[in-house]
Amino acid sequence: MSSDLDLNVYITEGRIEGADDGPLAGRTVAVKDNISTAGVRTTCGSEMLADYVPPYDATVVERLKEAGATVSGKTNMDEFGMGTTTETSAFGPTRNPVDPERVPGGSSGGSAAAVAAGAADLALGSDTGGSVRCPAAFCGVVGIKPTYGLVSRYGLVAYANSLEQIGPLAPTVREAAALLDVVAGPDERDATTRFGASDAGPDRHPAETTTYADAADGDVDGLTVGVCRELFDGADERVVETVESAVERLADAGATVETVSLPSVETAVQAYYVIATSEASSNLARFDGVRYGQSGGHDGDWNESFAESRSSFGPEVKRRILLGTFALSAGYQDRYYRKAQDARAWVRRDFDEAFDEVDVVASPTMPVLPFEAGETLDDPLAMYLADANTTPVNLANLPAISVPAGTADGLPVGLQLVGPRFGEQTVIRAASAVE
Ligand code: GLN
């Protein structure tokens, strides 16, 4: 394993000390560089924000400090979270600690690599379409994408707000769940941390009555696991075999294994890229050199200045702004955006129906083994298609975990377990039986 310097895990290294005691005292947490840290620059992996220093902490960072954690640094990421390899960063690619010739996955590749290489005990990433689960799978660690509304997004620089959540990465399921315990909960500064959204009662947020770490007890007696065939179709055979053996381990531990069909998931990645780029085209409008971002200069000529400022975005970000702007333009909305919303509703319904039959839905996290460095840079479509299994979960706003299933040709493979809304305990319990 290489040192973290070779791996390019951090964009900004440096300790931010937390309280003297608390549940994370003595633990280091690496934080993705799209999560705001007061006084410490937060670049989103972009030249655009290379000098941006936020005046405030994200709610999750406040909670880390209160819990006694030490933030070890701000981790490398695909620019604005747009990517699956951590190669679209303006700060150079991160390498995979398991095999430095391979990518760590993305977009939270720095966070996953930090945990896998021991550069931090734990990490936070953000997951818009798989960015916590993908790098967890590629680096052989655990990653949780929480139910939409479980964790505050206050201070997370938005890529596609209706899809994303901040989530924990850790070496084990229990540690990931314990980090979730610290960051989850209502926040009056984020209305999507929906009060009264669960069985917890009319005014309670589900995290207020739950200790997620306690669910990592390996007890899957009576649990029904639904194997989603559509999410195995087309996956690399080595991935399929490794994931199937992990599902067998669940059966050996006492779970019932069934097959479930979710036909809608085959539309998910297309719908995701329309919705995510549409939201991004609007969110990234604030980077114009006046409100945020590099100044464009050109005294008095607004168009020149705006164009100059926007030229500091990298090629993947520009591609997505163009795609999203096109999808939302007059005359095309019905053809793309509205259709994508219909697909999103269908995916949500399919999962709802599946959860009438089963407790968790199982699949490979990624249909492929970690890419070789550079492999997808000239082939964005290949990169987008690798998100086929993770994006349905964001469209449906559900909780999911990626847990190491084993290795194939020496490379890590992740098992994805998806649960019903606010069913974090169920996926944590099931995942802990796989370890
Ligand atoms: N790979 C996906 C994308 O590029 C997911 C990114 C993410 O979750 N931030 O959009």
Image (cartoon, rainbow, N blue to C red):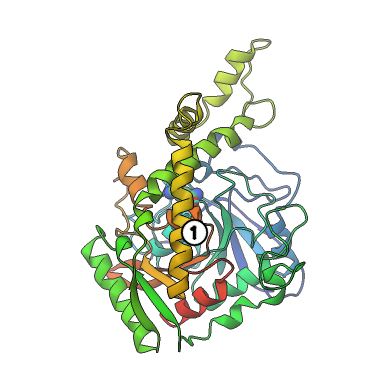
Q: Quadrant of the C terminus?
A: bottom left
- Quick one: SS at disc 1? loop
Please, is residue 363 above or below residue 223 in the view?
above
* Residue found at x 59% / y 48%: 34
The amino acid pointed to by label 1 is Val
| 230 lies left or right of 282 | left
Q: Is residue 183 visible?
A: yes
> What percent of the width, then of the height, locates residue 404?
39, 72
* Residue found at x 69% / y 29%: 291
| 281 lies left or right of 379 | right
Q: Quadrant of the N terminus?
A: bottom left
> What percent of the width, then of the height, locates residue 331?
47, 24
Label 1: how many Cα within 10 Å (few below 14, some 14–19, many 20+)? many
Residue 96 versus residue 195: which sits nearer the camera? 195
Q: Is residue 435 visible?
A: no
Q: Which residue is mark 1?
A: 132
> What percent of the width, then of the height, locates residue 127?
52, 55
* Residue found at x 39% / y 48%: 269
Query: In this figure, what is the number of numbered marks?
Result: 1
Label 1 CB sits under 8 Å from any ligand 1 atom: yes
> What percent of the width, then of the height, locates residue 423?
56, 71
